[in-house]
Amino acid sequence: MKRLNGIHLPVKKRTEDKQITPLPLPKTVRIPMLMHSGSPCVPIVSAGDHVDVGQLIGRAEASDAVPVHSSVSGTVRRIIRYELPSGQTVPCAEIETCETQLLADTCIPPVINTKQDLIDAARESGCVGLGGDGSLTFQKLSTNHPVQMLIVNGAECETRLSADGRLMLEAPEQIIGGIELVTKLLKIRETRIGVRRNRPAAIQQLLNAAANSRNITVCPLPSDYPQGAEKVLIFHTAGIAVPDGQTPEELGILVLNVSTLAFLYQYSQTGIPLVERVVTVDGDAVTKPCNLRVPIGTPVTDLLDYAACEPDRIHQLLCGGEMMGECITFRASVVKTQNGLIASNTVKTYEESACIRCGRCMNACPLSLMPVSLDKAYQQRDVNQLKALRVDLCMNCGCCTYVCTAKRPLAETIQSAKALLA
């Protein structure tokens, strides 16, 4: 089968053999009311209120929102404004933790016997796509198209991240349990799990866990980047090219991340909503790279302290991976979509020069776009040309910027072009 384009990144997974470790309980958590790609929730707690783990603190009033729950037992100190990496500000509950951590009495395993039960559970649990995209899981499960195939994203192709990799090694049965739950209720006939072939131990663990399950195939993926992008993953696991203008759902394909599926299984067994996250902490400024299980809302400075990282050594702090992560500040908290915290002591700067028409950006683009032409069209503010060149298909993987001989910020320019169209 033909492979889509991509790039080879240096191997920097220092945390690949680091077991997931619980972070000591933070003194304070700050939980934003928006941690997904939809609308913010409305806080339903006030200063002085006592809350427990799993208690509802943010009500989802919009159709494109999921509720927010407390990740700790403690006292609400205040409701503040929290600035997202995008610059948008949303309400945020600041909670001072107690020594004794208790589960809220609402944390009861849900009854899930039908597709609608599963959709309701996904929404009530506050579940979002844990691969980093922040999509709303209940909306994906609500598709009106018959689903023929579930494709599971275990690629995790960012160079320093290993949160999903550790989950596949340490709790593969939870992933398989989530797969069986979803495929049974959505009547899906076939499941394919994509894992990069340079992770043989994870592949074997999933094969062992799925030994008694029907119609689950583990598909080794190429080792280059990017493999976790939806269209790339579908092509390399199922050989299906998603046509322009169509969605995977229209082709009968549902794509979910391994961590998302593991969480859905956990919630079905415990009733504990999404209140914690596994985060890889790494980077040039980190002395003790690690994989940490942390309460949502934990200040990122607590993770940096645990990883023996001195703030004055940090020149760049990223939420996510080095290729697609967002810059954040020391005031940030861990959010639902966060799978990595990358601290760098140096930021490479390059002197940009004129395009030399080498074509490397086009050869690297997984979707065969023309970054150099998109760049030119944006500079000319040619909206019609941007549409003709399908700027909307760009998934912001950063391959074009990475390989550009002239050191032009092509990926950044293309995102500006998408914003211009919007």
Image: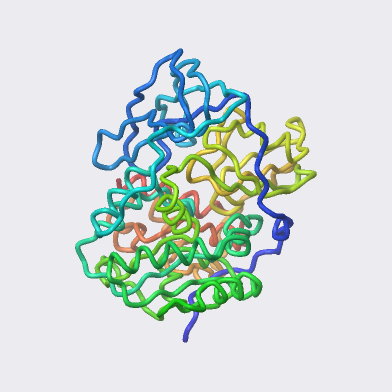
Horizontally, residue 360 falls left or right of residue 48, namely right
Question: Which x, y percent locates residue 126?
Answer: 38, 42
Total numbered badges shown on the rendered structure? 0
Give the residue at x 47% y 69%.
Answer: 366
Quarter-wise, where is residue 222 in the image?
A: bottom right
Question: Which x, y percent locates residue 182?
Answer: 35, 63
Image position of 328 with respect to 44: above or below: below
Tell me if residue 24 can be seen: yes
Question: Which x, y percent locates residue 167?
Answer: 58, 59
Question: Which x, y percent locates residue 89?
Answer: 42, 27
Give the residue at x 48% y 34%.
Answer: 103
Horizontally, residue 174 falls left or right of residue 43, namely right
User: What colour-coding does the image apply?
Assistant: rainbow
Q: Nearer the viewer, residue 385 or 362?
A: 362
Furthest residue toward bottom: 1
Horizontally, residue 10 falls left or right of residue 360, namely right
Tell me if residue 368 can be seen: no
Image position of 59 with respect to 352: above or below: above
Give the residue at x 57% y 58%.
Answer: 164
Furthest residue toward top: 48
Quarter-wise, where is residue 224 in the image?
A: bottom right
Give the residue at x 32% y 46%.
Answer: 123
